[in-house]
Amino acid sequence: MTEPLRRTPAEAARRARMIALSCLCFTFAMIGASFAAVPLYRMFCQVTGYGGTTQRAEMASATISDEEINVRFDANASPGVPWSFQPNERQVRLKLGETRQISYHVRNTSDRTVTAMATFNVTPELTGAYFNKIQCFCFNNQTLKPGESVDMPVIFFVDPAIADDEDTKDTHTITLSYTFFPVETPVANVATAKPSGT
């Protein structure tokens, strides 16, 4: 029977340091992966339209088809956003590739200034890869003063390629849905804030 390999104290210490360093590197890698997961998932959704995520376009479609599709509009505000929020048109019918502008009417029904951000998706979810927004209030936070009301535009088109996809070619109606959620009010810049009593 062979004797077990015995390490010198220096070798044992070096091995312990290597194990500790490996564990530390693994921990940092996992922390980094957790921070990267959200933006990577968001990027995946935007590229693939997964979960009904719409696309962002810089310009109008170069092609307009004779085929038409209905687009319905839905509006919601979470309990933390005291706004009345509804589309000015409930539904439009347009040609595939045709650029259309619609708008949503929003009014702050509270006695305080409120900042909110709109999340969005489309159903059926698979159509998200073909629903393109050129301009949308959902690209930025929106702030309304007490009692203020505005019309918020959305400029969009539905890519004609939707008719070539086996999974979406029989889609006749797409519903675009928005929900406003509250955004924390930023703290005033300490350097520019005046001390009280002055």
Image: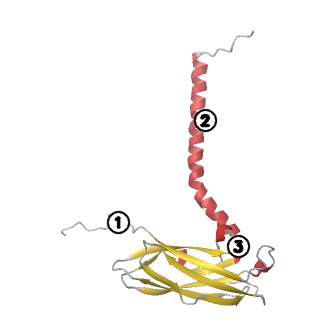
Q: Identify residue type, mark 1.
A: Asn
- Are there few (<14), some (14-19), or many (20+) residues within 10 Å of tag 3? many
Please tell me whether mark 3 sits on a helix, a strand or a loop.
helix
Please tell me whether mark 2 sits on a helix, a strand or a loop.
helix
- Mark 3 vs mark 1: which is more N-terminal? 3
Residue 178, given in percent of the width and then of the height, sits at 55, 77
Residue that carries the numbered disc 3 in the rendered image: 129
Residue 58 visible in this rendered orientation of the protein = no
Side of 147 relative to 103 (left or right): left
- Are there few (<14), some (14-19), or many (20+) residues within 10 Å of tag 1? few
Of tags 2 and 3, the one toward the viewer is 3
- Separation of marks 2 and 3 at Cα, in angstroms: 41 Å
Are the residues at dot 2 and dot 3 in contact (C-beta closer than 8 Å)?
no
Q: Identify residue type, mark 3.
A: Ala
Residue 68 in which image quadrant: bottom right
Please tell me whether mark 1 sits on a helix, a strand or a loop.
loop
Residue that carries the numbered disc 1 in the rendered image: 189
Image quadrant where one finds the C terminus: bottom left
- Mark 2 vs mark 1: which is more N-terminal? 2
- Are there few (<14), some (14-19), or many (20+) residues within 10 Å of tag 2? few
Q: Residue at image x 71%, y 76%?
A: 130
Position of residue 25 relative to residue 152, above or below, is above
Residue 18 in which image quadrant: top right
Residue that carries the numbered disc 2 in the rendered image: 22
Side of 182 relative to 33 (left or right): left
Of tags 2 and 1, the one toward the viewer is 2
- Mark 2 vs mark 3: which is more N-terminal? 2
Residue 51, given in percent of the width and then of the height, sits at 65, 68
Are the residues at dot 2 and dot 1 in contact (C-beta closer than 8 Å)?
no
Q: Identify residue type, mark 2.
A: Ser
- Separation of marks 3 and 1 at Cα, in angstroms: 41 Å
